[in-house]
Image (cartoon, rainbow, N blue to C red):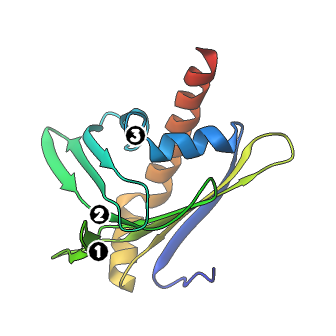
């Protein structure tokens, strides 16, 4: 995948947890509230159907305000790649004010960890800039840290 620096934001990290658990956390609704938004914000509702055209619906509580974010999966490659967007909702209904398309790519590392690449594609350079200024790298980095912590908790059980 070729990135467009005018409209795309991306980062790659190596996570010290197995890819299978990263995948499970991203595709099972019971896991999403544990990592998906930086604390103290939280996910109050999550409804996933991880298949092409399936829903990716979440509700966040941010500073006491509820924010619905409904979207669909555009691509699901088991254990390797998730692409979801808020450009459409279930049934391919166009959203009135889409923000981005997210792409998660996962690979095994030789030590049993996961190479984790997250990309946010935006429809314009202005939308990309706004997302970067909102704290894309810090926010998505915090989400990854929370994901690793949560997976470690799962492993300890």
Q: CA distance from mark 1 to mark 3?
A: 20 Å
Q: Position of residue 35 (x, y in %)?
A: 43, 38
- Crowding around mark 1 (Cα neighbors within 10 Å: few <14, some 14 to 19, many 20+) is some
Q: CA distance from mark 1 to mark 2?
A: 7 Å
Q: Quadrant of residue 38?
A: top left
Q: Quadrant of residue 42?
A: top left
Q: Is residue 105 left or right of residue 83?
A: right
Residue drawn where x is 50% and y is 40% of the image: 25
**Element type at mark 2:** loop
**Element type at mark 1:** loop
Residue drawn where x is 36% and y is 53% of the image: 49
The extreme right residue here reads 110
| Disc 1 to disc 2: CB gap under 8 Å | yes
Quarter of the image with the N terminus in it:
bottom right
- On residue 98, the disc is none
Q: Say which residue label 1 marks.
A: 87
Q: State how many labels appear.
A: 3
Quick check: can you spot residue 142?
no
Q: Is residue 98 above or below residue 34?
A: below
Q: CA distance from mark 2 to mark 3?
A: 15 Å
Q: Position of residue 3 (x, y in %)?
A: 59, 81
Using the image as rendered, state which of residue 19 and residue 147 is in the foreground.
Answer: 19
Q: Say which residue label 2 marks.
A: 71
Q: Is residue 155 above or below residue 73?
A: above
Q: Earlier in the sequence, mark 1 or mark 2?
A: 2
Using the image as rendered, state which of residue 36 and residue 11 is in the foreground.
Answer: 36
| Disc 1 to disc 3: CB gap under 8 Å | no
- Crowding around mark 2 (Cα neighbors within 10 Å: few <14, some 14 to 19, many 20+) is many
Residue drawn where x is 65% and y is 42% of the image: 20
């Amino acid at each position: 995948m070729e990135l467009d620096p005018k409209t795309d934001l991306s980062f790659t990290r190596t996570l010290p947890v197995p890819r299978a658990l990263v995948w499970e956390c991203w595709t099972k609704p019971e896991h999403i509230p544990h990592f998906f938004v930086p604390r103290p914000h939280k996910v109050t509702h999550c409804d996933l159907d991880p298949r092409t055209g399936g829903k990716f619906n979440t509700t966040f509580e941010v500073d006491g305000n509820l924010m619905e974010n409904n979207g669909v999966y555009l691509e699901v490659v088991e254990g390797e790649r998730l692409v979801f967007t808020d450009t459409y909702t279930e049934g391919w209904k166009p959203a009135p004010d889409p923000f981005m398309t997210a792409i998660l790519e996962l690979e095994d590392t030789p030590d049993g960890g996961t190479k984790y690449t997250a990309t946010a594609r935006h429809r314009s350079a202005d939308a990309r800039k706004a997302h970067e200024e909102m704290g894309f790298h810090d926010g998505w980095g915090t989400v990854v840290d929370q994901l690793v912590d949560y997976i470690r908790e799962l492993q300890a059980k």
